[in-house]
């Protein structure tokens, strides 16, 4: 439109010839003559044309190009086309072919793509985020994985790639993990903070289950263990909105860099342990952080971090955070709560109440309304009970010896092996009350056996092979593993097909 206005001014106001005007504007004389013909057909005077804005002037001079096409017959529904592009396998070429099949005189492919691009540009505006020094770290997992190969069996185990990135300096941390479960997720943060040597004020994770228990656009519910870890370092977790990757664009870009410069670099190397893999990943991470960045005066991420983020970040606490698990349990009628197939006692007055169980590497704590009501040494093997006498009601404490003696008396009526098995199960735990339920189960299995002899043989076999759990003893009874096998002499049968050395000797 600028050249059109200039052409009209030179020809009609300055009185310049057509030839000189075309040369001055750098256009062909034929193009200038066509423009003047369009002005004449439009019915506008040159002075009127110069008063119009660019849009109105184009509409008068090029009515066919600027006129709206018939939406019902020729103009595609661009909003619908953009929505269709989100479906798997749908391309612009496919949509254009379908459109031209219904409207052969419709838009060309280039114009069709321009309409889609313009619609996206209007509807998909973004706001640039400003990252304050030392404020935010963004966290996510890479979609591409690395692998560890068992050196004996050759079995391949895929490993997750955990990625962290600072907002202001772009400094990256990455490590390989077994899974995205809570233990790996939280300890990945701990090791990342230790790699940085400081902690941010805010961490922005994705909405994975280990971070967010219940997703919500405005008020997500965070996992309690994750909150405990963040509180230890004075960090606030602000999860990104679900399906809004631009909320954590920094780590999305870091994931892309990690995939290109770690996953791709290590793709042909074979690793036999997670430690070996992480050593290689750490070397590549250090190389990325030491590489100059374009647009930052050739400074590397580490230099920018030391100058910008680290001085404004939070110092690390004296002790690292210890991984812990929180779970909710209801206290059973035996005043015990279960954690990883082991039962821990609580005060008997809490029967039926819902409590919070906090487990660390060495201890299991039970909390009610933010108050600790019981603590036990953590037992990592499944099965069994950890019961403290102080948690038992008074009548149970007095009745305990009597119950144990009665069970031994009942076992003695079956046989000495059964009694010895019950005695061994009682002696296997520091507190006899922890064995009461298991002893009762063993006793009932023995009493329900088809005969006392069968129960005795099974008990003897269980004692000899240290099979003292209820499940193991039940399998012994069912399989008959303890049954005595009488050896039977088969003897030699003489018949016409019998061959031997004596027969060969006769033939020889």
Image (cartoon, rainbow, N blue to C red):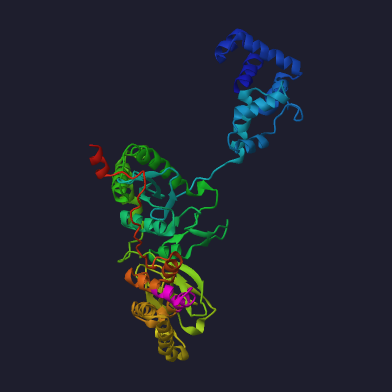
- In the rendered image, residue 284, in percent from the top left (x then y), is placed at 31, 43
Corner quadrant of residue 473? bottom left
Closer to the camera, 306 or 477?
477
Would residue 370 be found to the left or right of residue 288 on screen?
Answer: right
In the rendered image, residue 115, in percent from the top left (x then y), is placed at: 63, 30
Which region shows up in magenta? 440-456
Is 455 contained in the magenta span?
yes
What residue lies at 55% left-to-right and 13% top-to-bottom?
24
Whether residue 201 is visible to the viewer of this picture, yes or no, is yes
Q: Quadrant of the C terminus?
A: top left
Q: Nearer the viewer, residue 420 or 187?
A: 420
Across and down, in percent, residue 228 comes to: 43, 66
Q: Identify the main secondary structure in magenta.
A: helix
Vertical placement of residue 82 versus 61, above or below: below
95 relative position to 453: left or right? right
Looking at the picture, does residue 415 appear above or below residue 461? below
Task: Give the quadrant of residue 421.
Answer: bottom left
Question: 162 or 399: which is nearer to us?
Answer: 399
Indicate left or right for 396 with 97 as reference: left
199 to 301, vertically: above or below? below
Residue 99 occupies quadrant: top right
Residue furthest toward the front? 506
Asked whether 234 falls inside the magenta stretch, the response is no
Q: Where, quadrant-wise, is the N terminus in this rendering? A: top right
Q: Is residue 41 above or below residue 97?
A: above
253, 178: nearer the viewer: 178
Residue under the point 55% across and 51% down: 242
Residue 258: x %, y % from top left: 38, 42
């Amino acid at each position: 439109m600028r050249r059109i206005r200039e052409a009209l001014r030179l020809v009609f106001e300055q009185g310049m010839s057509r030839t000189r005007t075309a040369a001055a504007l750098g256009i062909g004389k034929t193009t200038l003559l066509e423009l003047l013909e369009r002005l004449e057909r439009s019915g506008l005077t040159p002075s009127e044309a110069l008063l119009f804005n660019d849009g109105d002037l184009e509409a008068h001079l090029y009515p066919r190009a600027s006129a709206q096409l018939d939406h019902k017959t020729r103009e595609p529904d661009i909003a619908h086309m953009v929505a269709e592009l989100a479906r798997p396998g749908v391309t612009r070429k496919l949509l254009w072919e379908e459109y031209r099949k219904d409207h052969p005189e419709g838009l060309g492919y280039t114009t069709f793509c321009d309409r889609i691009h313009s619609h996206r540009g209007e509807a998909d505006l973004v706001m640039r985020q400003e990252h304050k020094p030392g404020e935010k770290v963004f966290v996510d997992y890479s979609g591409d994985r690395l692998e560890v190969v068992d050196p004996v069996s050759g079995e391949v185990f895929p490993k997750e790639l955990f990625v962290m990135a600072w907002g202001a300096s772009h400094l990256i941390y990455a490590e390989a993990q077994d899974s995205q479960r809570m233990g790996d997720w939280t300890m990945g943060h701990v090791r990342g903070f230790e790699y940085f040597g400081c902690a941010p004020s805010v961490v922005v994770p994705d909405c994975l289950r280990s971070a967010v228990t219940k997703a919500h656009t405005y008020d997500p519910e965070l996992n309690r263990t994750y909150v405990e870890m963040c509180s230890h370092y004075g960090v606030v977790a602000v999860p990104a909105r679900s399906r809004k990757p631009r909320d954590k664009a920094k780590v999305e870009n870091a994931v892309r860099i990690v995939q290109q410069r770690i996953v791709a670099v290590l793709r042909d190397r074979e690793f036999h342990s997670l430690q070996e893999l992480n050593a290689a990943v750490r070397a590549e991470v250090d190389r990325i952080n030491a590489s100059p960045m374009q647009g930052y005066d050739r400074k590397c991420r580490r230099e920018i971090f030391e100058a910008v983020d680290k001085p404004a970040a939070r110092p690390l606490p004296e002790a690292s955070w210890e991984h812990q698990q929180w779970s909710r349990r209801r206290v059973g009628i035996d005043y015990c709560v279960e954690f990883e197939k082991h039962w821990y006692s609580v005060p008997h007055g809490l029967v039926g109440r819902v409590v919070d169980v906090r487990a660390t590497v060495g201890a299991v704590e039970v909390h009610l309304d933010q108050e600790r009501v019981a603590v036990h040494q953590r037992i990592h093997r499944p099965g069994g009970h950890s019961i403290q006498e102080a948690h038992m009601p008074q009548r149970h404490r007095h009745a305990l010896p009597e119950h144990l003696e009665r069970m031994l008396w009942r076992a003695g009526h079956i046989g000495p092996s059964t009694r010895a098995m019950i005695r061994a199960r009682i002696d296997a735990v520091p507190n006899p009350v922890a064995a009461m339920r298991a002893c009762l189960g063993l006793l009932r299995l023995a009493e329900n056996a088809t005969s006392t002899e069968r129960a005795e043989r099974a008990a003897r076999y269980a004692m000899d092979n240290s099979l003292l759990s209820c499940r193991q003893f039940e399998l012994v009874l069912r399989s008959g593993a303890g049954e005595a096998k009488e050896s039977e002499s088969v003897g030699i049968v003489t018949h016409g097909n019998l061959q031997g050395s004596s027969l060969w000797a006769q033939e020889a």
